[in-house]
Image: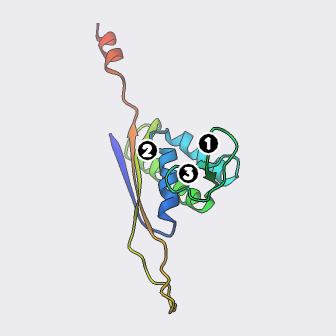
Amino acid sequence: MEYKINAKDLGISTKISVEVCNLLRNKQVKKAQQILERVIEKKQAVPYRRYKREIPHRAGKMAAGRYPIKVSKVILKILKGGAAGAQNQGLSSELFIGHISAHKAGNQWHYGRMRRRRMKKTHINIILKEKQNDRKTDNKQKD
């Protein structure tokens, strides 16, 4: 079973969202929420692997990294709502992030600006999945 979440037109940077999504992919929801809370508290940096020009190194096993607080707050809110919705649909609490991706949305003009500035908009897609039992353990239990 899986639970899909589509968040549209979020006012966050697409490039930073891609880096945060890469950090959270294939993690358990509870663990991902803890990671995002640590990023918000500036105790854990998000490694930047793709969009990393002129970004300083951080302590630990990563090279370039930052603390994207705004993006982390938005994705944490989406994950909490998605986990609650999945449990409401009958899925177990042992969920993991099977798919997470950030895509660029259509840019909207700032109201009243004449200098051609546009707002940053992002779509985020998340699929939460239940943990599957291994077939080997199922076959052993049948014998």
**Residue under the image location 31 percent in, 20 percent down:** 135
Q: Which residue is mark 2?
A: 87
Q: Which residue is mark 3?
A: 48
* Residue 64, horizontal then vertical, whole percent: 61, 50
Q: Is residue 143 above or below residue 128?
A: above
Side (left or right) of 38 relative to 118: right
* Residue 51, horizontal then vertical, whole percent: 51, 57
**Residue under the image location 44 percent in, 39 percent down:** 26
Earlier in the chain: of badge 3 and badge 2, it is 3
Cα distance between the residues tagged 3 and 2: 32 Å
The answer to whether mark 3 and mark 2 are in CB contact below 8 A is no
Cα distance between the residues tagged 3 and 1: 8 Å
**Residue most toward the front?**
54
Q: Which residue is mark 1?
A: 62
Earlier in the chain: of badge 2 and badge 1, it is 1
| Label 2: element kind | helix
**Residue under the image location 34 percent in, 43 percent down:** 2
Residue 97 seen in the figure: yes
- Label 1 amino acid? Met
Earlier in the chain: of badge 3 and badge 1, it is 3
- Given residues 109 and 86, the one toward you in this image is 109
| Label 1: element kind | loop
Residue 80 seen in the figure: no
